[in-house]
Image: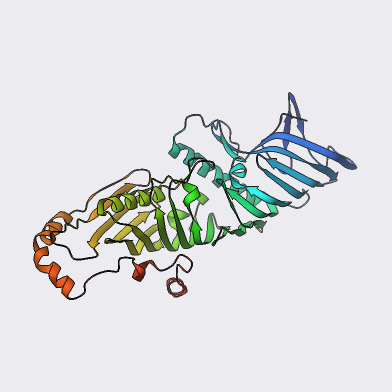
Amino acid sequence: MSGIKVVRPNPKLPVITLGCLSIKVSLVSLLHGDVNLENVTVRDLRVPLAPEPGRKQEAALHFSQISGRLLISGEQASLENLVLRQEHSILTGRMTLDTKPDPVKLVIHLQSPQVDLDSLSHMVALEDAGSSSGPQRRRAMLSTMDTVVERAMKMVQGELVLKTDRVRWRGETTGKGELRITAKNRRLTIERLELEPPGGKIHLRNAIWPVGKELGSNLEMEVRNFSYGFLTRETPSSPMRSQGVLSLHLSLASQAPRVSDLLGKADGMFQVGVWPKDLKTASFDLWVANLLFAFLDILAKKTASQVNCAVGNFVMQKGLMTSKELIIDTSKVRVKGEAKLNFANRTISVHLEPRAKQPQFFNLETPIRISGTFDQASAGVSPGGLLGSVINFATSPVFAPLRRLFGDTLPEAGKDVCRSPQTWPPAADTAEDK
């Protein structure tokens, strides 16, 4: 069978379009007795995630090929010896569906020697997107996510488990990976998302549940010693455009009407450290990463120095992320700053003050301000900063020798602030923030 498309999905009564023939499938009313199909293969299957009348853009699951042994008995169905092919990934396992309980029970267990995340990411596609801009596509995906999560909590219970010995991501092969998602009592939980990149680890846990007419959420994420270079490739086969490692710890709790609003209402903490090795022009999917690395590159070139690290420690209240500590350390200059990121109205405000590590005559240390929206931010001289820079410049012949005399210098390698990506953030700092 080919050319199969599922439209208006409903676990109780799906509609399958097969060429010009439409069949409403009800496991109870249509089928009497047992069905045993030894070898069923479906190619190019597209399942709309959140169909709405008159909606031009629609996210859909796209499966290149699914095959297995289909067993149907009464209100229960299972797909044994399941093989799911998606470009460079081949997953095997079992899927069962029981339509008797309300909500229906769906259990999917998959495993594979190697999973290609790039090919699996193509399973979710925004159809009929045309020439939509980035913000339009983002809004469409967020709207779809809201609908999918809401329907999943109301209509499905069960679990999805995916295990693999190796994960391939943008041309790089890492260690083991595991994903476990459960749906129970209208609570949708990513119980475990773990990846083991060389020398590091990535761990994420997230739960969403109804609170009256709103949604509650808890999010925990930890990344240790992650080599981010391959993420800067234009394609999985192209060379890396930047290299280095990062570590972070994120802990957020939130309550909002929709999933897409949770970050704008969140409370919690965020700690991040970056240790660049090569600051070629980077290109990330995250705007904040592009902004950070563009600034680090400019700073390194202007000061003719090597960037040692960039470290940030933030608290978040009602969607407003404020820095407790923000330091960029280079071999010749140290930059301290303050930052505010508002996820409710998507605006950013950063004030940075550079300081030469060694006292210098006639050194102009001009504060920098970055402000704007998440989609478009600009940098310039901080208000009032130029006057202070001129005063420092004029008085440097007097104060520079005094700074040297009293040892007012900073270590070139930045060991006092950079610490190590294997241990960042320190346990003491984590405990204090919690």
Judge whether residue 2 can be spotted in this image: yes
The picture quadrant where one finds residue 404 is: bottom left
Q: Which of the 4 image quadrants contains residue 418? A: bottom left
Q: Nearer the viewer, residue 232 or 344?
A: 232
Q: How many marks?
A: 0
Is 17 in front, or is 126?
Answer: 126
* Left or right relative to 297: residue 217: right
* Residue 117 pos. (x, y %): 60, 47
Against 184, is 423 above or below? below
Q: Is residue 410 above or below residue 10?
A: below
- Residue 303 in picture, x, y percent from top left: 25, 54
- Seen as rendered, the residue at the extreme right is 33
Q: Is 250 placed above or below 121 here?
A: below
Q: Please name whichever residue, 392 or 385, is drawn nearer the observer in this view of the structure.
A: 392
Residue 390: image quadrant is bottom left
Q: Position of residue 229 (x, y in %)?
A: 47, 51
Residue 44 picture location, percent across and down: 69, 33
325 left or right of 56 in image: left
Q: Is residue 340 toward the left or the right of residue 53 in the image?
A: left
Which sits in the foreground, 265 or 310? 310
| Residue at image coords 73%, 33% | 16
Q: Residue sitting at 23 percent across and 70 percent down? A: 409
Q: Is residue 100 left or right of residue 328?
A: right
Whether residue 348 appears in this view of the structure is no
- Residue at screen point 13% across, 72% down: 402
At 9% across and 60% down in the image, what residue appears? 394
Q: Which quadrant is the N terminus positioned in?
A: top right
